[in-house]
Amino acid sequence: MTPTLAQSHLPRAGTTSRGVDRCARARDWAEIQERMLVPLYEAVYERLDVGGGTRLLGLGCGSGLALLMAATRGASVTGVDPSAPERLALARERLLPDAGPDPQPHGDARLVDGGPADLPGQDAPPYNMVTAFQPIGCTAGDSEGLSGLLESAVPLTGRGSPVVLVGWGPPERCTTSSVLRVATKLAEPLRSTGSWRPALRDDLEEVAQRAGLKPDGSGRVACPFGYADTDSAVRGLLSTGLFDAAVGATDQVQVDKELTEALHPHMRRDGTVWMPNVFRYLIARTR
């Protein structure tokens, strides 16, 4: 398993406005936060033997790191994301670079600003793997959008294809849970609109059942969140969107202040921030 390492990130001018600039937030996700899930991507791809024969459809693909890792293994990848155009623009930079002296070998990658129903070429060969790597089980109602994506994606797959769902592990195994509770406290008036909640044991199984999928194994992967300093940690956590309701209920300055205070117990002597976490994945099969 590849360890998650803290990396340095230069502070931006006007940091008090972070979380307002959606492009800056998407860049924070791609440069700081997304890499925290690399051990999860690797574990899933290794278990399912992702390679040259894989036709992968990534739901909610965001800035495309998971797709890039699959493409590097030889997979043909397609990503859809109906709600994060700024992240998808970064995925295009990663997977569809302009021709140059050393172009990347991902020419068959496809990215769509929409859902599976918006994919062109419905006569293409069926996908034999679907991933939904955006973890659920952390905010109220976060599985509802995923259910809709799965309903559109399953008809594009072959029978028995694996569908990978991901969720946060038990709160007692996720150190970040104590920090995420800041979102719940500050967003109390808006709790039904996306504030944090503890993950439940059967979150993934319930989503699979609603989509008509058959569970076929699961696993847990350690994904520690490591940051170069508190500022990087605040920027990375804000980029997840889990604090949006809190910002709406209070203001950005208040959220920054309380988030920084919540991170203090996780700061090490060298100034880095380290929070061990466990994420769970479920492999379900299409019928």
Image: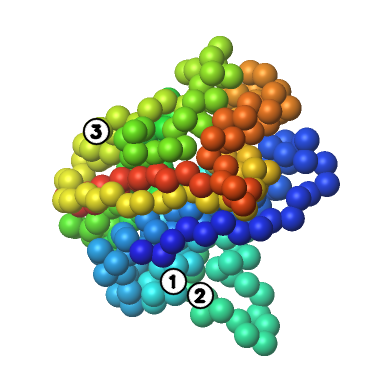
Q: Amino acid at mark 2?
A: His
Q: Residue at (25%, 64%) from the top-left corner?
A: 48
Alpha carbons under labels 1 and 2: distance apart:
7 Å
Indicate left or right for 85 with 54 as reference.
right
Residue 63 lies in what quarter of the image? bottom right
Question: Which residue corresponds to mark 2?
Answer: 106
Indicate left or right for 287 with 83 as reference.
left
Q: Amino acid at mark 3?
A: Asp
Question: Which residue corresponds to mark 3?
Answer: 202
- Answer whether residue 185 is visible to the viewer in this image: yes
Q: Amino acid at mark 1?
A: Ala
Residue 141 in percent (x, y) is at 41, 27
Alpha carbons under labels 3 and 2: distance apart:
36 Å
Q: SS of the residue at dot 3?
A: loop
Residue 233 in percent (x, y) is at 61, 44
Indicate left or right for 217 with 235 as reference.
left
Instruction: Locate the N terminus and report the quarter of the image it occupies.
Output: bottom left
